[in-house]
Image (spheres, rainbow, N blue to C red):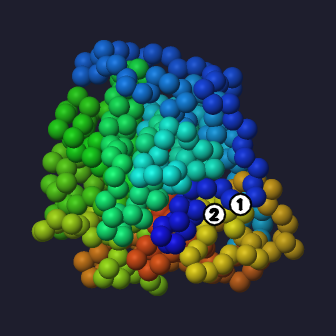
């Protein structure tokens, strides 16, 4: 249970001393244009009646509400020599595509499944870290869903069967169908998920998108972190999905970028939780968000400026007293930092595991020489699967949107 509680704290809650962004849930935005229909819903979703998602409070973030995703995204670029440059965040006024994001296991609610009450310290904070920055390229829709909680996960790992019954996927499916019926209007859509969220989107692609050409043609891309998509060894398609392949080059549309992250110096052990297919004859896919076509690339990380933020905490180690830059070089006043050149990554294969190997490149000077976010060897860098490549994801979505617009 200790590990799982730590994972919850690391992957979601703020607990970092940072001031919460001001939010007004369920209210209309005053800073951006309201949603305007561009065309009818595709026939499959015409007339769909939402079970739960006509309630504005059942969305963590969406483009017609003032919410946590509209605040606190400015970053400070921290160069190796200690040079600090503030990078203001500007959302797109007219994004060409949409993003649909499903967050990881982060709820500390009592019981096996969470309720509808999303917290800015849990569901909100992880959405801010993992998806809000994509608003420079897309309209963001992030539903609340009654997910399996950390307590429920701990019980299952300990061999216990919770008495409470739940169906998180039913919520995600309802949210997606509501979005398709009421908000999509024929626009291209990008899917983004992590951990449990990746599991939800994996099932959504398998059952709702892969077999249906009318839905599949709207798939700009899918980013599935912290979970596996199985494919035949050396192939891009043919395992879990019949028609949706792994991406093989930047800007390719209708495909999946899939990765789990471990340090290059600490590859997955034989009992790792991630990076191996559970199906005979298949391998877990790995697509490097920093080099979609293959090879190594710089991981364009956006991490909380407070290096003691809970999303970065390590089990069995401490980050207290650490800083992204020596105070002699100046102070960071933004909520996030960007660390160019500090980490690179490449897909590797070890002992039947396929994973994104992250290599840290220390540089003598005032900037920090390492990252945080480690758990046990079995978990690797699961906590920061998305933070480590956030800038890459923005670039990848931009390239896919450009390709999609030209189709």
Give above or below for 18 relative to 276.
Answer: above
Residue 78 seen: yes
Residue at disc 1, secondary structure: loop
Q: Which residue is painted at 71% across and 83% down in the image?
A: 364
**Looking at the rendering, which quadrant does residue 372 occupy?**
bottom right
- Which residue occupies the foreground of this view, 109 or 401? 109
Q: Nearer the viewer, residue 265 or 137?
A: 265
The image position of residue 180, as x and y in percent, is 36, 26
Tell me where residue 57 appears, x and y as whole percent.
55, 30
Quadrant in the rendering for residue 120 = top right
Asked if labels 1 and 2 touch by Cβ distance under 8 angstroms, the answer is yes
The residue depicted at 52 percent of the width and 50 percent of the height is 109
Which secondary structure lies at badge 2? helix
Could you tell me residue 144's position as x and y percent?
48, 39
| Residue at the (19%, 33%) spot, across then down | 212
In the displayed structure, does residue 264 sit left or right of residue 311?
A: left
Which residue position holds label 1?
A: 16
The residue wearing badge 2 is: 310
């Amino acid at each position: 249970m200790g590990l799982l509680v730590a994972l919850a704290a690391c992957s979601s809650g703020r607990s970092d001393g940072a001031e919460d962004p001001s939010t007004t849930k369920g209210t209309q935005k005053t800073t951006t244009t309201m949603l305007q229909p561009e065309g009818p819903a595709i026939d499959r979703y015409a007339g769909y009646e939402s079970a739960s998602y006509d309630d504005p409070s059942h969305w963590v973030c969406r483009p017609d509400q003032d919410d946590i995703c509209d605040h606190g995204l400015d970053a400070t670029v921290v160069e190796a020599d200690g040079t600090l440059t503030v990078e203001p965040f500007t959302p797109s006024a007219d994004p060409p595509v949409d993003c649909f994001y499903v967050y990881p296991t982060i709820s500390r609610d009592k019981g096996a499944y969470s309720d509808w009450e999303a917290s800015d310290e849990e569901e909100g904070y992880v959405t801010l870290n993992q998806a809000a920055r994509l608003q420079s390229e897309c309209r963001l829709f992030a539903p609340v869903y009654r997910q399996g909680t950390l307590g429920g996960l701990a019980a299952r790992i300990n061999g216990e069967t919770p008495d409470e019954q739940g169906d998180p996927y039913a919520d995600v499916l309802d949210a997606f169908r509501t979005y398709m019926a009421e908000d999509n209007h024929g626009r291209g859509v990008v899917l983004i998920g992590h951990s449990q969220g990746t599991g939800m989107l994996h099932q959504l692609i398998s059952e709702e998108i892969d077999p249906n050409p009318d839905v599949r043609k709207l798939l700009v891309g899918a980013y599935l972190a912290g979970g596996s998509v199985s494919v035949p060894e050396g192939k891009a398609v043919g395992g879990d999905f019949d028609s949706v392949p792994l991406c093989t080059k930047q800007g390719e549309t209708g495909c999946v970028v899939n990765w789990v992250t471990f340090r290059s110096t600490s590859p997955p052990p034989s009992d790792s939780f991630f990076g191996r297919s559970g199906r005979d004859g298949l391998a877990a896919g790995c697509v490097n968000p920093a080099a979609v076509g293959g090879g190594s690339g710089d991981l364009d990380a956006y991490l909380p400026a407070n290096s003691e933020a809970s999303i970065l905490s390590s089990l069995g180690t401490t980050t207290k007293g650490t800083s992204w830059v020596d105070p002699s070089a100046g102070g960071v006043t933004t909520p996030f930092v960007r660390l160019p050149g500090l980490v690179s990554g490449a897909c590797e294969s070890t002992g039947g595991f396929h994973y994104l190997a992250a290599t840290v490149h220390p540089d003598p000077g005032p900037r920090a020489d390492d990252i945080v976010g480690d758990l046990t060897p079995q978990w690797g860098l699961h906590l920061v699967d998305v933070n480590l490549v956030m800038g890459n994801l923005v670039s990848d979505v931009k390239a896919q949107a450009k390709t999609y617009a030209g189709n």
